[in-house]
């Protein structure tokens, strides 16, 4: 409730929040189709057009620049933008607003914590107030190179997820996809060897292959 009132129009701040001058805070959100603003709004049952404050055009990384220059600025972003991926700590000139979170979330978002501790909490499903979203691939199963890339993600690439501030794949889903994609790749290679110009009429919606990102509140 507190976060909804902070970020969205037509949500009333309670008296304590008004005393804390929450109404003086300037909200910065992204305005591009690729911005995490859409997923953040959906998580709270809101429309992307209902945010308070200022909209920033361009990459969500620009939101970091905006709030670092505005002492009253508050926004949200992906972990890769919020944290320094070398030091694993929150970037300079910003800090996380540790509000409306459970015990595990608060510990993972404290100043003493780092991105890896937060990723562990998110992957343990102990986080309830931090929005996450799945992304996937929809592709034509005739394309062997795309299938090879997806197989590489499952077998090798997934180990780099934490390095870049991304959640690892769900273990059950990973096991399912690890069985499916190599079989598909073998069929593609067989079809290509039998008839190089053959095109299968079948398409595969592979939205099951997912990765995740997380938006966090920070100022």
Image (tube, helix red, strand yellow):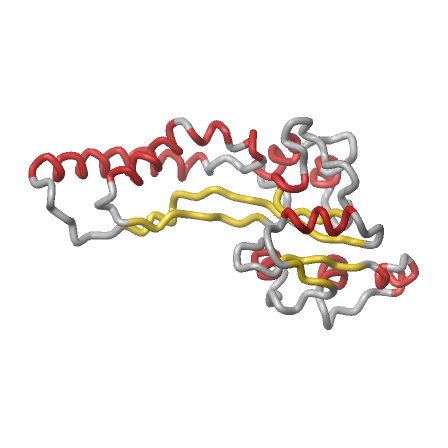
Left or right: where 127 falls relative to 174? right
Q: Position of residue 132 (x, y in %)?
A: 57, 48
Residue at figure coordinates x 75%, y 59% from the top left: 27
Left or right: where 100 falls relative to 29? right
Residue at figure coordinates x 69%, y 27% from the top left: 87
Residue at figure coordinates x 77%, y 42% from the top left: 94
Residue at the extreme bottom of the image, as rendered: 10
Left or right: where 79 falls relative to 207? right
Q: Where is residue 37 in the image (x, y as percent from the top left)?
A: 61, 57
Near-viewer residue (123 or 95): 95
Residue 89 versus residue 23 in the image, above or below: above
Quarter assignment of residue 15: bottom right
Residue at the extreme left of the image, as rendered: 194
Q: Position of residue 179 (x, y in %)?
A: 29, 34
Quarter assignment of residue 50: bottom right
Residue 14 versus residue 178 in the image, above or below: below
Near-viewer residue (187 or 62): 62
Residue at figure coordinates x 13%, y 35% from the top left: 190
């Amino acid at each position: 409730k507190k976060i909804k009132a902070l970020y969205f129009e037509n949500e009333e701040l309670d008296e304590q929040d008004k005393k804390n001058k929450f109404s003086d805070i300037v909200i910065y959100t992204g305005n591009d189709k690729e911005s995490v603003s859409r997923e953040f709004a959906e998580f709270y049952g809101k429309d992307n057009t209902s945010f308070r404050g200022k909209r920033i055009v361009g990459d969500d990384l620009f939101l970091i620049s905006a709030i670092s220059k505005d002492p009253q600025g508050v926004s949200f972003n992906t972990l890769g933008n919020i944290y320094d991926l070398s030091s694993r700590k929150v970037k300079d000139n910003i800090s996380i607003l540790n509000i409306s979170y459970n015990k595990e979330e608060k510990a993972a978002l404290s100043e003493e914590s780092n991105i890896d501790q937060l990723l562990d909490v998110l992957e343990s499903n102990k986080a309830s107030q931090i929005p996450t979203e799945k992304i996937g691939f929809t592709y034509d199963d005739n394309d062997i190179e795309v299938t090879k890339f997806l197989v590489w993600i499952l077998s090798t690439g997934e180990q780099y997820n934490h390095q870049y501030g991304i959640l690892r794949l769900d273990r059950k889903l990973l096991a399912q996809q690890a069985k499916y994609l190599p079989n598909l790749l073998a069929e593609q290679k067989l079809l290509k060897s039998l008839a190089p110009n053959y095109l299968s009429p079948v398409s595969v919606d592979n939205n099951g292959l997912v990765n995740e990102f997380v938006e966090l509140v920070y100022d």
